[in-house]
Image (tube, rainbow, N blue to C red):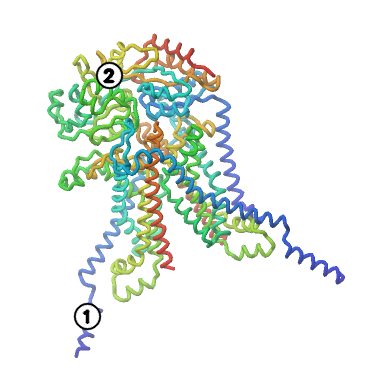
Amino acid sequence: MTNPDRAKQYLEVEHNLFQADPKNLLLEQGFTWLVRIFAFSTAGLLLWLSWIIFQDAEPAIAQFGSDFLLSQNWNVGELSFGAAPFIYGTVVSSTLALLIAVPIGLAVAIVTSENFLPVWVRSPLATLVELIAAIPSVIVGLWGIYVMIPVLQPLQLWLYKHLAWIPLFSTEPSGPSMLAAGVILAIVILPTISVISRDVLLAIPLELRNASMSLGATRWETIFKIILPASASGIVGATILALGRALGETMAVTMVIGNSAGINISLLEPAYSITSVLANEFAEALEKLHIGALMYLALILFVITLIVNLIAVLMVNIFTKKIN
Amino acid sequence: MAKSLLDKSLETELHQPLGVGRTLFSWGMTGIAFILTGMALLPLCSILLEILRQGIPNLGWEVFVSLPAPQGMTDVPNGFANALLGTILMVGIASLLSVPFGVMTGIFLSEFGKTSTIASGIRFITVILNSVPSIIAGVFAYAIVVITTHQFSAVAGGFALAVLMLPMVALTTEEALKLVPTSMRLASASLGGNSFQTTFRIVVASALPGITTGLLLAVARAAGETAPLLLTALSSQKWPDGLFSPTASMSVLIYNYANSPYPEQIQLAWTASLVLVGMVCITSILSRLFARKRSLVR
Amino acid sequence: MIFFTPAFRLVVTTSLLTVAVTLGQGFTAITQALTLNGAGATFPKPLYDRYFAEFSKKYPDIQVNYEGIGSGGGIKQLIAGTVDFAASDAAMNDAEIDKVKQGVLMIPTAGGAVAVIYNLPGVSGLKLSHTVLPDIFSGKITRWNDPKIAADNPGVELPDERIKPVVRADGSGTSFIFTNHLSAINDDFKTQVGATKEPKWPGNPLKGKGNPGVAALVKQTAGSIGYVEAAYTKQTNLPAASVENQKGRFVAPSIAEANTALANIKFPANFRVFEGNPADGYPITGVTWLLVYKHYDSAEKTEAVKKLIQWCLNDGQKFNNGLGYTEIPASVAQEAIETVNSGISTP
């Protein structure tokens, strides 16, 4: 090969390297934009969803305004609607669920993250609890009707017979009740709490535990005074995330809550939740105002879960930053 | 003098067994923790046992190939073949809709946006979208598809499920892509690959098992959803009839039959539950297999 | 190429296959048969399931799909135009009829009794008088051992338990028939609740969706009382109370007694009747209607609807008694067929 030939070759290569092919450039930019468009449309979906629900709720918002939140009257025939019993049912059943699920979920997280048990028992145990999340909630509801309520009913009767002086247990139970809804929700949200809490506990640096133990603290003293405080923001985050899940859960609740719109202090009384009224009445809402009222309820639920989940995500972020 | 006293007290403290109170506390807490863990497992075991106990007697070939029998007709086979098909159909539609958007969003978050403000914004919105209650997705699909087409349909059901699957697919895709070492991207770029080639031929291709895992998990979740389908696909006693007509699904069939006064329909609900749980489990196991493959690749 | 890894190929092939199989199934169904979609009352659901299964045996090229979503839902769907026909056991009122752009015909297909079912272990043959029944559902009588109930049921051991009424959660023609009767026999009930598809029940009753939902709740809940179409009692083995009629006789819901009640009803030209308290027979009795449009956009659909109505009113009627419904008198059925044949068209 002669020298000029080689020089020419080098020049060609240089040309190829520094002068991008215009077709290639177009493809490159086009692809970048395509990806951006897809990503923005995903984000746009949330806005679209909010807008559509708000728009369809408009007739009811215009008609009832904020009175909707406090009114107890839900009468499809007279087209007068109020959300209070549904908001009450959703909030109380979710609170009950948290009261039951948080201690149990934390216990599972502690048992599966500490070395009480050999690893070959511990991790299948964690997976098993996680498995509850994989069971469709309609099946949990089916189980609720035919297994849980018959088991729960004697307990409810006992509460009524012996503790009726407490307003919470002051009415004779029928079976489906606010309490039943709380218990079934607790089962549904348990994996959320235990799985995230377990991850949080496992993320606590070993040094903290070693330091505490070497100073003479027992295992449980270490858990209560060192590990739990250090992981508090993560566990609270998990709890709030579970709350979001409980507020939005539909099928399992609908199947055991009794679907009766009324505000009653007694937990043994049937109740109604926002999600169950949506599931029950949407397919047959006839009047624009009725659809509007249901959309208004959906909007309320959407806003509540949005706020709750925002807080939860922020809490978990705080914890991750702290650990890192 | 004082020093020796201190020594002595230290010595006793170090050599004496733990105080009664502290010992009791330890044992008590351990006991409570184990009892509570047992309580957590109780419903799960009960649910699984009950599904098996009630579901198996009815489980035969005919439930997979025949339609639900009208009440009062005992001479025809009773099954839920249409619901099985409907669930597969709607999850299929949902996957077709959500996978392009989800994977592209994941690519944007991991390859293009990375830590920019826009990307964290979109990531945040996707996380929030992931926690939207499923019935809200149903209400949305009702307003968008059912009201405009005047028809409960498989498309409306698929659309609602797609809204639920999209953020899951996007987030798991991002996670999977993040695991691909940067050196592979650099190698591709240094060989002259443009961003399209680098992304699809190198990054997505090597993250494929991870993406598939995420997709299968999303499919498993969508297959069990009931609430959004109640408002969008309704249900049907017949075979799916095109994409724009009411369509049966396993989950809605279970819900309807759970609230039935007829013993044979309740029986069928349990059998359908067994099959649905089986489908979800198989999907989850498949996803784990893909996840294992991913770890081998790495 | 890494893009075409075996894993990727596997995923693509399986998903394509699944889609092809499912879509193929859907499309073959389209080409094979014409489908009529209907929705509405759960009251005649067992009957219609049977009707449409038998109908498709005779006309394999026509499939009929019926969803029990409640009468209110059926009428809504009909107005929205999302179904080909609907069913209701509360006749549409004028305001509702006006909303249907294509026009609507109401075709009676069956009559039925609304049974008052209860779940009281150890108690059978419960009797409920004119005074007791409305008071139970308006929350004035709250315990099973109330002296008023005891007076109707001498010798029956009634438990000291709370009465748990079970009512419909959805807009329902069964609720209409039931409240229509209670309003006819009790003025307080009429002013307080009234005859409507969506009654505002006093107290805090349990609510079930559809007739099956109410029956299932009563079955699961000891001490409960509810109302369902009589066919549901037969297939679920729930006891039904005997109810006092206009003549003062306690009547159990049966086809014969429902026939007696309907015998005296005169059907007007539009087949709309609202009888709250028939002269004799089982007092809580109503009629259920198929609601069809006057105009369909295709000639095939028009023909199919005509065939369906004709079949239901001729061949179909013989299934009514077996499933616990009354037949429509033959003269009325002929009138209805004529109305449909002349009244439905393709514009």
> Which residue lies most toward the right here?
A2
Kindly state the secondary structure of the residue where label 2 is placed. loop
The residue to which callout 2 is attached is C276
Query: Residue B236, can we see it?
Result: yes
> Which residue lies most toward the top here?
C331
Quarter of the figure with residue A227: bottom left
* Left or right: B272 in relation to A44: left
Quarter of the figure with residue B16: bottom left
* Left or right: A157 in relation to A212: left
Q: Pointer 2 indicates a residue of which chain?
A: C
How many neighbours does mark 2 have within 10 angstroms: few (below 14), some (14-19), or many (20 or more)?
A: many
- Which residue appears at 23% of the width and 74% of the height? B17
Kindly state the secondary structure of the residue where label 1 is placed. helix
The residue to which callout 1 is attached is B12
Q: Which residue occupies the foreground of this view, B292 or A85?
A: A85
- Which residue appears at 39% of the width and 70% of the height? A206
Image mark for residue B110: none
Please name the amino acid that badge 1 sits on: Thr
> Where does residue A38 sit, x and y in percent of width and height?
56, 50
How many neighbours does mark 1 have within 10 angstroms: few (below 14), some (14-19), or many (20 or more)?
A: few
Quarter of the figure with residue C209: top left
Frontmost of labels 1 and 2 is 2
The quadrant the N terminus of chain A occupies is bottom right
Q: Which residue occupies the foreground of this view, B4 or A241?
A: A241
